[in-house]
Image (cartoon, rainbow, N blue to C red):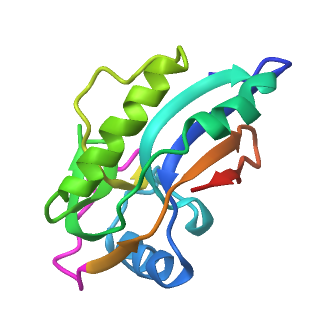
């Protein structure tokens, strides 16, 4: 989905602190990936809450305020490596905390209220480690990542040869 003039690509996410990011990198590096795989760069590792897609740039400020919702801090524990659909290497949580389910649902209500489409598939929280990872060998095990979640972010992604992510709003 390419950006057209006057639009930005947005998503809501859990954004890791440096120590959690380092642990995610260790897990990512534990996957034995095929040569064609495209590992997610260190600085882009995150857990998506809702992908919003392309929205008019003029709505960015409005949306930043719309996604400010009541939030209960929680702990997320990651440690289940898998490959989805024989192509996407991910790290999943050991279990899904109710506070994560609640945050996802509340933000989903705000996405809908803003007139944006919601993902139709059921929510499966994960951190993507690599794309084009068919045939990857999973790490045998590793230390579980205890990720204290004290907030979430609205992110903007710029596509292209040197795609970048930038934080629009922290909550």
Q: Nearer the viewer, residue 95 or 4?
A: 95
Q: Is residue 108 above or below residue 18?
A: above
Q: Quadrant of residue 90?
A: bottom left
Give the farthest residue toward the right: 5
Q: Is residue 167 above or below residue 21?
A: above
In the drawing, does residue 9 fall left or right of residue 116? right
**Magenta-span inclusion, residue 142:** yes
The chief SS type of the magenta part is: loop
The residues colored magenta run 132-144
Residue drawn at point x = 42 percent, y = 37 percent: 107
In the picture, the quarter occupied by the C terminus is bottom right
In the drawing, does residue 151 fall left or right of residue 44? left
Give the farthest residue toward the front: 70
Percent of width and height locating residue 3: 74, 23
Percent of width and height locating residue 69: 47, 45
In the drawing, does residue 114 fall left or right of residue 63? left
């Amino acid at each position: 989905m390419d950006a057209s003039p006057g639009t930005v690509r947005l998503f809501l996410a859990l954004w890791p602190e440096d120590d959690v990011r380092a642990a995610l990198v260790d897990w990512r590096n534990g996957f034995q990936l095929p040569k064609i795989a495209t590992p997610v760069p260190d600085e882009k590792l995150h857990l998506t809450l809702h992908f919003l897609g392309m929205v008019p740039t003029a709505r960015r400020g409005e949306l930043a305020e719309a996604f400010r919702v009541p939030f209960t801090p929680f702990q997320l524990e990651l440690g289940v490596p898998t490959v989805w659909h024989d192509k996407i290497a991910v790290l999943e949580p050991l279990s899904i905390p109710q506070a994560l389910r609640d945050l996802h649902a509340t933000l989903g209500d705000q996405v809908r209220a803003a007139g944006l489409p919601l993902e139709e598939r059921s929510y499966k929280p994960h951190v993507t480690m690599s794309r084009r990872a068919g045939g990857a060998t999973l790490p045998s095990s590793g230390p579980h990542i205890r990720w204290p979640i004290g907030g979430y972010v609205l992110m903007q992604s710029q596509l292209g040869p040197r795609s970048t992510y930038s934080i629009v709003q922290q909550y």
